Image: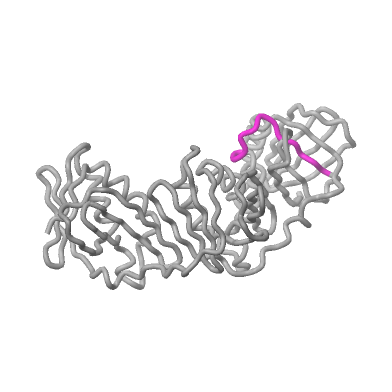
Amino acid sequence: MQLIVSSRDALVRKLQVVSNIVEKRNTLPVLANVLIRKQGQRVELVSTDVEMQISTEADMGVGADAVSTTVGARKLLDILRSLPDGVDVNLKQDARKISVTGGKSRFSLQTLPAEDFPLVQEPSEWLVNLSLTQGLLKQLLSNVHFAMAQQDLRYYLNGVLLVIESGQVSAVATDGHRMAYANVQTDVQAGLAAQQVIIPRKTVLELLRLLSDNDDPLSIELASNQARFSFSEIRLISKLVEGKFPDYQRVIPKHANQVVLVEREVFLRSLQRASILTSDKFRGVRCIFNQGLMTVSASNSDQEEASDEIEVSYDGTPIDIGFNVTYLQDVLNNLKTEKIRLVLSDGNSSALVTKPEGDDFKYVVMPMRI
């Protein structure tokens, strides 16, 4: 039975959308497969890891009948990638196998029944429905994702807090040593009181991979334990992280008054030079601020030392403070501004990194003993 006729490139693009979340090792063999659902010409591809589900659609079906089956996602994608560019691909179902034909190549793959595929159960109604552009959400997540925890026992830190309120959407991430906060303005009303949900780390990274930097529309729907993101013929449904996110407002320094303005690129290059002499076990660098000058230094157990001076705009009292160099490099690599503003109080208190031109981004990093 004919399933799909498509150009190799078009089918690869669709499979790439859904196949990234497919785990190589699964307790359920069907989780390594992609679900193919054909209804006439409309074909839907679906993948899931049980916590998250991604689907996309395209008109590449053959015949008017309805057919559903599953086939190994990575194998199918690898086969298609190996075929010559521009070749047309034909997928046919025969008993419990799918044949893939492209040019003079032919492959036969085992299938598993579509009924065994564990589709995510969606809620009967979504409590919040919000519209943004893809570019705005991507910007929001890009500005905070690097501060997420990885496999922390405090599971509520392994993701991004999304705060939806009238006229504004905010995102917050922290691993307990640093915190990133960003917001974007929107005219769309959420329709309810302020909502706070924690989007899992894996979902955040998938959204960053799939979203485009444009003004194409995106819909966010929230239920008590699920979120759904719909954009560009893609639907991503994810479970939410349960738990109470820390009060991020309390973390932001309120009384720091020593302000340093520094060129982002210059500061980043200085940190990269100094970090050469740090070690994997100790990533500390020392920053000494004097009027108009910052000295960045590092040393290691072999008694090797690095020192680098850069000009800054600063006329406060001298401050000597240590940081994890990775935490500073992360924020400087992800911000796209020409300059950044560092707000300090002393060498033992958290530092605040912001943009000089606005307050839509805040990054708090704890000091480190050097």
The answer to which of 188 and 249 lies nearer the viewer is 188
Q: Where residue 273 sits in the image (x, y, percent)?
A: 63, 34
Q: Which residues are magenta?
A: 333-344
Rendered position, 23 above or below 11: below
Q: Residue at x 15, y 63 (%)?
A: 97
Position of residue 30 in the picture relative to residue 61 (left or right): right
Q: Is residue 164 on the magenta stretch?
A: no
The answer to which of 4 and 340 lies nearer the viewer is 4
Position of residue 96 in the picture relative to residue 343 (left or right): left
Q: Residue at x 59, y 69 (%)?
A: 242
The answer to which of 14 and 30 lies nearer the viewer is 14
The residue most toward the right is 317
Rendered position, 97 above or below 63: below
Quarter of the figure with the N terminus: bottom left
Q: Residue at x 73, y 61 (%)?
A: 247
Rendered position, 169 above or below 308: below
Query: Colour scheme of this structure image?
Result: one colour
Position of residue 76 in the picture relative to residue 265 (left or right): left
In which quarter of the view is residue 299 placed? top right
Q: Is residue 337 on the magenta stretch?
A: yes
Position of residue 177 in the picture relative to residue 216 (left or right): right
Q: Where residue 106 sits in the image (x, y, percent)?
A: 12, 51
